[in-house]
Image (cartoon, rainbow, N blue to C red):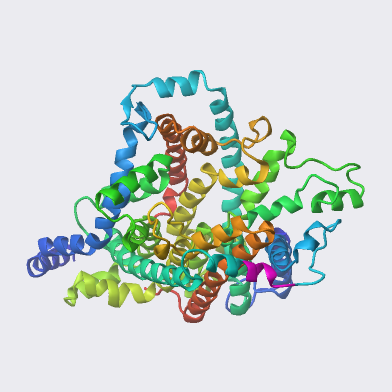
Amino acid sequence: MASTSVTNTKKLKASNKRVGNRIGGTISILLFLTILGAFMVFPIYLAVVMSIKPAQEWFIFPPKLYAIDPTLDNFRQMFKMAGNLWVPFSRYAANSVFVTITITLVQCFTASMAAFVLAKGKFKGKKFLNSIIVISLLYQSNVIYIMQYMVVAKLGLINTYFALILPMIATPMGVFLMKQSIGQVPDSMIEAAKVDGASMFAICWNIVMPNQKPALMTLIIFAFQASWNLQGQTYVFDEALKTLPTAVQQAAASGLARQGVAMAAAVFMLIPPVIVFMLAQKNVIETMAHSGIKD
Amino acid sequence: MSNISHENKKSYKKTFGTNSQTRECWLMLLPFMLFFVVFTIIPVVMSLPMGFTDFDMASFPKFVGLSNYQTLFLQDKTFIQSIRVTLIFALFTGPISYVLCFLLAWLINEMNPRLKTIFTLIFYVPSMANVYTIWQLVFSGDPYGYLNAILMDMGIITSAKQWLTDANYIIYVVIIVQLWISLGAGFLALRAGFQNIDKSQYEAGAIEGIKNRWQELIYITIPSMGPQMMFAAVMQIVASFTADIVGRSLVGFPSTDYAAHTIMTHAFDYGWVRYEMGYSSAICMVLFAFMFLANKFINKLLGKYMN
């Protein structure tokens, strides 16, 4: 379908500024994206429908693609059960908000700075560090989690917020993402600032980072999403320190109409990341609409 | 000319001092590196020798040499099957999803701002939502499963197919769902990359004789997307080689005839079901070797676009 759009654009004459800005092409692209988009969204739609279906409708055959008598019972049930655990629901929510915001902020700060140095710094061992970052991304093993647990335990961090926060800050993906993007900043920009006497720290935060909005917003989305869904049961056993995913999962596992509550839990947990995503995307698109990086 | 720049460099070195700059580099690396070394590198290094041990998590690991690897390759038929499944998986989901990530990010970039946000969300949301089990309703084996119902209505099949338990279909079902959740980190990074491209390059390109969007893509867009394409490739390698949980929760564990039994599933089986962590670790080591090679290969392919 993409090729049709191109042949369409080819047939028509070129415009003044950019090649191939054709209405026919745009429409076929839109059509392609809409069809594929429908496939992507349909299961999400189903999940939302399931979360507002009352229990008796789960067993209607053939299954309907909508809820006949929509209800928020599943959500109510989830909140009730999550609130009936040892500590009130608000405590889990507060823990999650605190942990998520801390991880996101600290990760953006540390990862951006490290990435700047790994992309633009000049020092021995840079190449080695860069390949370590990629290799640590590729190496996956069950055993790592056991070893990580041992490290956290040795440091006496078990059952503290640190046990949830620190391992997340140590993930290499954010650095890799930022490093790839900062690497595209022209060297001349950095050299010029150096000649003007700016420190590396100042160059990073005053010159490079303001140009890195798309990558930074992407990092914010990743960090928020990962920490919001953080399952920390192995690191904290004190109920007052546990986060929302743990509470919501316990609620979903103990309900009568389990599947409905489980779907309600999944839909509920999805709302904050989607909001953060929309805000971040809007921000990027607005600031980058007319610019892009310039040499 | 070169003489002057050489002079400049020299005096610059004197005033700025390479040493102080190196020190500043390390200082800026420190906050990340501290956590990275303690919570990622040390656990990774500690886990490396575990493949050579017998480790049940209760007693101290016992060194057994290469015996885990010997068992793996010479006796463990399920492991050989899991390699097969993983490679089929990686070869399907990896490249397809990668091309989709790039194509969609590129097409979305041409839209107006509001559509950009909406389409990016639509394609990204499956990887964000933890609802892939909903596909069980679609592929349900009774005649009222959505897929069965549609296909029977259209007269394509006459009786309900057991999509989730028939070994002939399992792998396709899991591949489809895996593809559905695969427009994740790589896709977003590519979206961000497209937003970074200096638009004046396209105008310059049009003047220099670029005729259509394909040429624009090949001569301008792809060369300025190298780093993001590399990032997306690494993410795609990790996602497609370590596929496991989707299969386990959709088609059961173990799946019929081990049709969706990936290396990661095998490692899960030995690690968290049988508590043979040494053996599980050896399995992960083999997987790492595959991913390392795939990464080397991708590096070769994309090398010309890096700087």
For this rendering, which residue is in front, A248 or B26? Answer: A248
Q: Position of residue B9 (x, y in %)?
A: 14, 65
Q: At 33% from the left edge and 21% from the top edge, which residue is drawn?
A: B65
The percent position of residue A153, horizontal first and vertical second, equals 29, 49
Direction from residue B64 to residue A233 in the image, left or right: right
> Considering only vertical position in the picture, is A147 above or below A59?
above
Residue at 70% of width from left, 53% of height from top? B135
Q: In the rendered image, which quarter is residue B6 located in?
A: bottom left
Residue A120: give x, y in percent of width and height: 28, 62
Can residue B211 be seen at all in this image of the molecule?
A: no
Q: What residue is at 54 percent from the left and 38 percent from the top?
A: B265
Quadrant for residue A94, please give it.
Answer: bottom left
* Viewer-proximal residue among B211 and B37: B37
**Position of A76 compared to B52: left or right?**
right
Whether residue A175 is visible here, answered yes or no, is yes
Residue A96, picture quadrant: bottom left
Q: Quadrant of the C terminus of chain A?
A: bottom left
Is A21 in front, or is A32?
Answer: A32
Q: Is residue A255 above or below residue A104?
A: above
Quarter holding the N terminus of chain A is: bottom right
Q: Tell me how many marks there are.
A: 0
Q: Residue at x 37, y 43 (%)?
A: A146
Viewer-proximal residue among B3 and B285? B285
State the extent of the magenta-drawn residues as a range.
Answer: A71-77
Left or right? Give the position of B54 relative to B209: left
Percent position (x, y) of residue B155?
Answer: 92, 48
- Is A173 a magenta residue? no
| Residue most extreme to the left | B14
Q: Main secondary structure of the magenta part?
A: helix
Q: Is residue A236 above or below residue B247?
A: below
